[in-house]
């Protein structure tokens, strides 16, 4: 199998129900050494292609970002055979070129989370515990997502530095100013440790960021109003992207 046709897993966040008519082929609660995953692993067909799907916050959205069992989720997806993961994540934007209602495929991460179990390595080991994370996202998966966006005519940010905050509260204006000085262009709460756990298991991983608001202090408008106004559009754009991406898949 070429790397581009390895079994695909989709991690969905807020708005998964908009993926439309999903033909559910199989549903399996996968026990893991790391405890319970957020949801059963659901084998679905979209556009005639089969892949596995996990709801990061649970079906019914019951788990906040800091309480998600990222280790169990990534392990369960790998256990059922996924070798590439596309993660949907809603984010705020710090970058005028990445307005709410659009998508971005970030290429870098800065991790501001704390106290989240963030590794599968728990014993002193050799170098393998120190995974190379210079490029946190898989280049060919990112390219495939961007190509799908291009075919679909979607406005998509081709890069982005995703600052991952602890949540569940939103940031202060000063925190966002600091993130901007650090070089972040996007801010969300779920990108880590998901990305590094995928790397530890050797899975290709990329994020499709759904931009749903301007980050704190970027505009005077209340953030919740922004989210309410833009979530629907960003979600439907992400659904179009995923469907276009899946159409180009083998399997
Ligand atoms: N900050 C953090 N996480 C988010 C935001 C935000 O502004 N919007 C959506 N997820």
Image (cartoon, grey):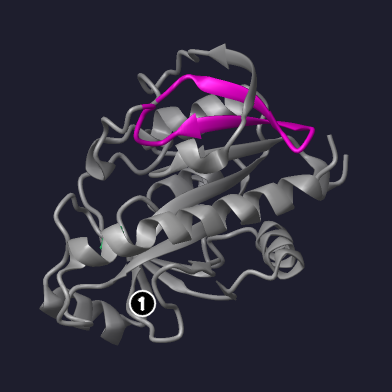
Q: Position of residue 239 (x, y in %)?
A: 57, 50
Q: Any magenta on residue 47?
A: yes
Q: Position of residue 75 (x, y in %)?
A: 50, 29
Give the residue displayed 38% in from the left and 23% down from the top. Answer: 34
Give the camera-side residue of 51 and 198. 51
Left or right: 202 as drawn, with respect to 147: left
Residue 144 vertical position relative to residue 118 in the rendered view, above or below = below
Magenta segment: 39-59
Left or right: 2 as drawn, with respect to 145: right
Please identify the residue farthest to the right as the structure is shown: 1
Give the camera-side residue of 174 and 222. 222
Quarter placement of the C terminus: top right
Give the residue displayed 38% in from the left and 77% down from the top. Answer: 185
Residue 127 visible to the viewer = no
Q: Position of residue 40 (x, y in %)?
A: 47, 19
Name the residue that disc number 1 marks.
184
Give the residue displayed 67% in from the left and 27% down from the top. Answer: 81
Q: Any magenta on residue 56?
A: yes
Residue 133 visible to the viewer = yes
Q: Position of residue 55 (x, y in %)?
A: 44, 33
Taken as a whole, is the magenta stretch helix, strand or loop?
A: strand
Badge count: 1
Assign ligand 1 to one image quadrant: bottom left
Left or right: 35 as drawn, with respect to 67: right
Give the residue displayed 47% in from the left and 53% down from the top. Answer: 235
Residue 42 vertical position relative to residue 218 in the rendered view, above or below = above
Residue 7 vertical position relative to residue 180 in the rendered view, above or below = above
Quarter placement of the N terminus: top right
Please tell me whether mark 1 sits on a helix, a strand or a loop.
loop
Q: Examine the image and state in which quarter residue 222 appears.
A: bottom left
Residue 95 vertical position relative to residue 215 in the rendered view, above or below = below
């Amino acid at each position: 199998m070429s790397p581009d046709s390895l079994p695909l897993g989709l991690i969905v966040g807020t708005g998964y129900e908009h993926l439309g008519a999903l033909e559910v082929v199989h549903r399996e609660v996968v026990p893991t050494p790391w405890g319970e995953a957020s949801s059963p692993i659901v084998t679905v067909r979209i556009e005639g292609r089969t892949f596995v799907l996990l709801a990061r916050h649970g079906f019914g959205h019951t788990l906040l970002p800091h309480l998600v069992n990222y280790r169990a989720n990534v392990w369960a997806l790998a256990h059922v055979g996924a070798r590439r993961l596309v993660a949907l994540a809603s984010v705020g934007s710090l970058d005028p070129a990445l307005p709410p209602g659009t998508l971005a495929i970030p290429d870098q991460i800065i991790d501001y989370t704390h106290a989240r179990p963030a590794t599968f390595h728990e014993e002193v080991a050799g170098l393998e515990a120190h995974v190379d994370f210079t490029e946190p996202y898989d280049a060919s998966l990112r390219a495939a997502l961007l190509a799908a966006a291009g075919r679909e005519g979607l406005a998509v940010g081709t890069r982005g530095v995703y600052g991952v905050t602890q949540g569940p509260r939103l940031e202060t204006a000063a925190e966002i100013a600091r993130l901007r000085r650090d070089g972040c262009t996007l801010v969300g709460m779920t990108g880590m440790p998901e990305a590094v756990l995928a790397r530890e298991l050797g899975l290709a991983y990329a994020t499709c960021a759904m931009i749903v608001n301007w980050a704190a202090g970027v505009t005077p408008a209340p953030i919740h109003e922004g989210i309410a106004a833009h979530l629907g559009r960003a979600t439907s754009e992400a659904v179009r992207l995923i469907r276009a991406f899946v159409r180009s898949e083998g399997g």
